[in-house]
Image (cartoon, rainbow, N blue to C red):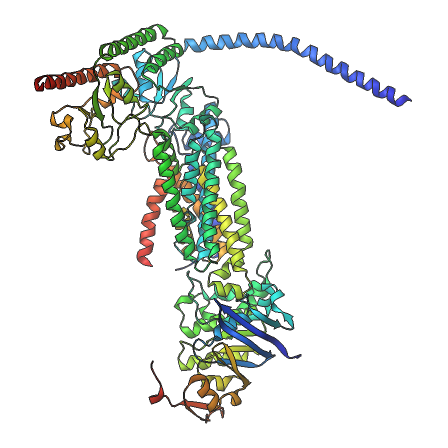
């Protein structure tokens, strides 16, 4: 296993990011292809509607894909490092089922305010789920980190059952809407969405980079970290809150996009090393590119319709997960 | 002492300025408005001369548009819009879960007709933000169909034919109601889905049709429009007729084989009906013919039981 | 008193009303090597955790260079006390370099990056424990002795003046047992070590503490502590003490045999 050095890794990743974002902007409806996009970029679009499509629909979508992938991947890194569990994933907090419950409750609100309230309701739901999990775990003094994951699973099932009940009692069409929303999609992308998500992810990244050295200490054992002067419980709570906030924001706008946070850190770890700072940056960039390309696949594989993005990531992720378990 | 005077002057000057700007502006804007209105009228005329470009986002909307002769105006539609035959050739721009926003923008439609409960509302909001004109179809009751036919006629300029179709629809419905409203109710079980066993209740679309045929539904008061029920409950209810709608292109392998349950009157006496689900469940023009047929079949069952009780007596 | 680097007064710790460590008083002086011996469950490891501030809800006081440790921030404690624990099993593929680098943590502010000086410090530490050419190897693939040496290198980088080791010779063969103890003796630190092997304790420690049932049974120079009667009281076994012909230090041989009871 050879790891890339800093000097080689960063330019390589940045080149990949630039290539992915530019290249992915050329996929979509067939009339607006790479050539037309190029024409729009260097001068005048051949039709004025292309201007709108490219800059207000497609590019925001590509950028949202990158941001969401970035955020989910760093949340995965943080979760795995902070629990020392290679199978940890921010979704194990019950974030998605919490967001799902929030979104479901939002469908009960009047139609006219639904566009605004669905992401907000989902965000509140996600945070509620995380708080519930954290409360349970903090009450038993973090005796075992694996309790965090188990509590997350239990909360997930609890909230999902509540969601199912509400959907069952409610209107069949709003059930569809929530179910499809949970499968994940980037179609909500616009400037406003980007302006909400970007700061959250940037703050999460910077905070965790600042704490990277302390997070490294945690990689060996809690005891080892505390003998190195790290306040382990406090560090863990800070990191979990960061994970929860960034994942909740992403989930509330993009729905359930599973396994990115689980899969990407593993790939980044073998290629770029496991200390927190470089793993964070490498995973983030890699995860961003990954989701950009998954979204390209989602909107081009079937003509005339999209595949929900979460369907693709979950399919790839679970196969990856099984392969990983076989090796472990 | 000069100070208050100066202040006073300034105030007067400001007041004058304000008054001037208030009086002069409306004069200007009235002229502007007139010009604008004229330009808009011309634009509207030009647009009327051009073919109207419609995106119709539900099968029943497509059917109705074809019915009133505006089918060729549809430039995009959603999945499952399969009637009439020509509809299958229309480009698909989404389904009930997701619309392809890029595609719809590129088509530059004049109007998007969406089904409020069957079209993703967040995507429609997005399209509205891009300045597209969205109108909704939301048939709740059988008579809403004719109401919406008229509205579509208004929208496409085919008022005459729409009115004619609407009147015909209403006449047919009235006829059905008139024919059966005095008849004795016949109890039915409506199997909308087999596993899990789901029926209709309250204000569900098929329930309104059952009411017109004077068919009584033992489950009408359950909590939701499409409640799940237990087979045991069906045994207890013991319906005289079982309605098991079939989709025309495929049979449902999960559908319950009611012949296995001879305890139920409807099964014992082979009173099992298979109306066409595509026609009956779609909120458009075609349903009324299929509904006539269903009521007719139910009336046959009604007569069957009448004869049986006559013989027994 | 000037020599004292770490001391405790009436130190007790209990969990669920059960005393694990009971009213311990002792002083660790600068530069000495102190061993803690005693049967399993005597509270040796717990005592080390209390002394290194890993256990915080203690009764009594611990003083580090004269300061009450309860009021010291964790980081300042880590600048003075480094700990090498029995066995570490990292979840991910940490390299030797990654682990040794952790020694810098107490010395770095949130926004500080590694300097050239740090890199030199790390490579010197690696050289001292003779792991220079294994610095990119995965920690989990090292032998037991190498893992201990790697953790010692981390302690060197941490540059604390007190090194606390919990059973450093466990799981090691005889060669490595001596290698590790000789290595840490060479570092010129104040050492506090728990140890099972009394002969090793006799050979390397200046002073010995005996613990039993959470209490301190003896605290004296090695030769005085290793007496027949005290060992019988501690371990319940008769023994024979003579002189190690190579080191002239006490050599203990336990009788064992018939009076070892299995109940």
**Side (left or right) of B200 relative to A199:** left
The foreground one among B164 and B254 is: B254
The foreground one among B28 and A137 is: A137
Tell me the residue at 50%/59% (across/down): A216
The N terminus of chain C appears in which quarter of the rendering? bottom right
Q: How many marks?
A: 0
The foreground one among B307 and B226 is: B307
- The percent coordinates of residue A11 (x first, y second) are 49, 49
Identity of the residue furthest to the right in this view: B1
- The percent coordinates of residue B235 (x first, y second) are 19, 32
User: Against A303, is C210 above or below?
Assistant: below
The C terminus of chain C appears in which quarter of the rendering? bottom left
Tell me the residue at 31%/11% (across/down): B69
Tell me the residue at 47%/52% (across/down): A78
**Side (left or right) of A170 relative to C241:** left
**Side (left or right) of C206 relative to A81:** right
Rendered image quadrant of residue A258: top left
Identity of the residue furthest to the front in this view: B313
Residue A121 visible? The answer is: yes
The foreground one among B252 and A268 is: B252
**Side (left or right) of B24 relative to B13:** left
Residue A12 visible? The answer is: no
User: Against A165, is B205 above or below?
Assistant: above
- The percent coordinates of residue C239 (x first, y second) are 42, 91
Rendered image quadrant of residue B115: top left
- The percent coordinates of residue C123 (x first, y second) are 53, 69
User: Against A309, is C222 above or below?
Assistant: below
Rendered image quadrant of residue B124: top left
């Amino acid at each position: 296993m050879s790891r890339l050095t800093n000097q080689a890794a960063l330019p390589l990743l940045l080149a990949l990011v630039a290539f992915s974002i530019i290249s992915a902007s050329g996929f979509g409806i067939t009339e607006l292809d790479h050539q037309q996009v190029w024409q729009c970029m260097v001068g005048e679009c051949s039709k004025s509607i292309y201007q709108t499509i490219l800059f207000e629909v497609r590019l925001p979508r590509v950028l949202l894909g990158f941001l969401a992938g970035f955020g989910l991947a760093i949340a995965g890194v943080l979760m795995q490092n902070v629990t020392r569990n290679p199978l940890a994933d921010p979704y194990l907090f019950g974030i998605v089922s919490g967001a799902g419950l929030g979104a479901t409750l939002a469908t009960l609100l009047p139609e006219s305010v639904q566009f605004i309230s669905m992401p907000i309701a989902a965000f509140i739901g996600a945070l509620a789920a995380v708080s519930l999990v954290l409360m349970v775990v903090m009450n038993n003094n973090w005796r075992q980190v694996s309790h965090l994951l188990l509590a997350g699973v239990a909360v997930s099932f609890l909230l999902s059952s509540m969601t199912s009940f509400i959907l069952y009692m409610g209107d069949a069409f709003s059930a569809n809407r929530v179910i499809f929303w949970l499968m994940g999609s980037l179609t909500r992308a616009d400037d406003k969405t980007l302006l909400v998500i970007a700061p959250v992810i940037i703050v999460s990244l910077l905070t965790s980079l600042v704490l990277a050295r302390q997070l490294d200490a945690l990689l060996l054992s809690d005891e080892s970290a505390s003998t190195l002067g790290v306040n382990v419980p406090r560090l863990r709570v800070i990191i979990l809150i960061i994970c929860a906030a960034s994942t909740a924001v992403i989930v509330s706008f993009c729905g359930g996009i599973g396994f990115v946070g689980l899969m990407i850190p593993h790939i980044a770890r073998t290629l770029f090393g496991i200390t927190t700072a470089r793993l964070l940056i490498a995973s983030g960039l890699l995860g961003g590119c990954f989701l950009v390309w998954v979204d390209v696949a989602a909107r081009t594989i079937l003509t005339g319709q999209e595949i929900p993005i979460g369907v693709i990531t979950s399919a790839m992720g679970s196969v990856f997960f099984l392969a990983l378990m076989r090796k472990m | 002492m000069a100070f208050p005077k100066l202040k006073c002057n300034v105030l007067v000057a400001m007041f004058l300025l304000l008054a001037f700007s208030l009086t002069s502006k409306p004069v200007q804007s009235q002229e502007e408005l007139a010009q604008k209105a004229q330009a808009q009228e011309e634009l509207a005329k030009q647009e009327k001369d051009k073919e109207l470009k419609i995106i119709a986002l539900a099968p029943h909307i497509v059917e109705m548009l074809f019915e009133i002769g505006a089918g060729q105006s549809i430039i995009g539609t959603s999945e499952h819009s399969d009637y009439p035959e020509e509809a299958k050739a229309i480009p698909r721009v989404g389904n009930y879960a997701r619309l392809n926003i890029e595609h719809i923008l590129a088509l530059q439609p004049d109007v998007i007709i969406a089904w409020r409960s069957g079209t993703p509302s967040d995507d429609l909001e997005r399209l509205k933000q891009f300045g597209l004109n969205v109108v909704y179809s939301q048939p709740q009751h059988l008579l809403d169909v004719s109401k919406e036919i008229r509205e579509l006629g208004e929208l496409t300029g085919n008022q005459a034919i729409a009115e004619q179709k609407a009147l015909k629809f209403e006449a047919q419905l009235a006829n059905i109601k008139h024919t059966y409203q005095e008849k004795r109710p016949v109890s039915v079980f409506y199997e909308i889905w087999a596993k899990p066993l789901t029926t209709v209740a309250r204000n569900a679309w098929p329930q309104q049709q059952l009411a017109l045929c004077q068919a009584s539904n033992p489950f009408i008061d359950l909590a939701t429009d499409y409640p799940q029920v237990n087979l045991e409950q069906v045994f207890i209810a013991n319906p005289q007729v079982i309605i098991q709608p079939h989709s025309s292109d495929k049979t449902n392998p999960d559908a319950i084989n009611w012949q296995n349950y001879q305890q139920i009157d409807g099964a014992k006496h082979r009173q099992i009906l298979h109306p066409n689900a595509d026609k009956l469940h779609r909120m458009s023009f075609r349903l009324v013919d299929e509904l006539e047929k269903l009521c007719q079949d139910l009336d046959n069952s009604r007569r069957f039981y009448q004869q049986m009780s006559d013989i027994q007596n | 008193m000037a020599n004292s680097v770490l001391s405790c007064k009436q130190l007790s710790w209990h969990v669920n009303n059960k005393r694990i460590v009971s009213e311990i008083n002792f002083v660790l002086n600068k530069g000495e090597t102190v061993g803690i011996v005693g049967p399993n469950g005597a509270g040796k490891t717990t005592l080390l955790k209390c002394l290194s501030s890993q256990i915080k809800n203690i009764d009594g006081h611990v003083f580090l260079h004269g300061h009450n440790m309860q009021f010291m921030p964790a980081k300042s404690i880590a600048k003075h006390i480094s700990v090498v624990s029995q066995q570490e099993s990292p979840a991910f593929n940490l390299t030797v370099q990654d682990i040794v680098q952790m020694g810098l943590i107490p010395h770095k502010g949130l926004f500080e990056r590694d300097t050239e000086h740090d890199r030199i410090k790390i490579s010197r530490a690696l050289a001292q424990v003779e792991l220079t050419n294994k610095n990119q190897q995965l920690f989990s693939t090292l032998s037991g002795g190498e893992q201990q040496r790697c953790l010692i290198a981390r302690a060197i980088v941490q540059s604390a003046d007190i090194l606390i080791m919990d059973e450093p010779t466990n799981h090691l063969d005889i060669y490595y047992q001596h290698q590790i103890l000789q290595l840490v003796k060479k570092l010129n630190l104040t050492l506090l070590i728990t140890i099972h092997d009394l002969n090793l304790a006799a050979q390397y420690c200046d002073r010995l503490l005996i613990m039993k049932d959470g209490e301190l049974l003896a605290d004296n120079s090695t030769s005085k502590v290793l007496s027949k009667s005290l060992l019988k009281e501690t371990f319940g076994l008769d023994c024979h003490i003579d002189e190690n012909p190579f080191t002239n230090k006490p050599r203990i041989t336990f009788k064992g045999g018939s009076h070892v009871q299995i109940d």
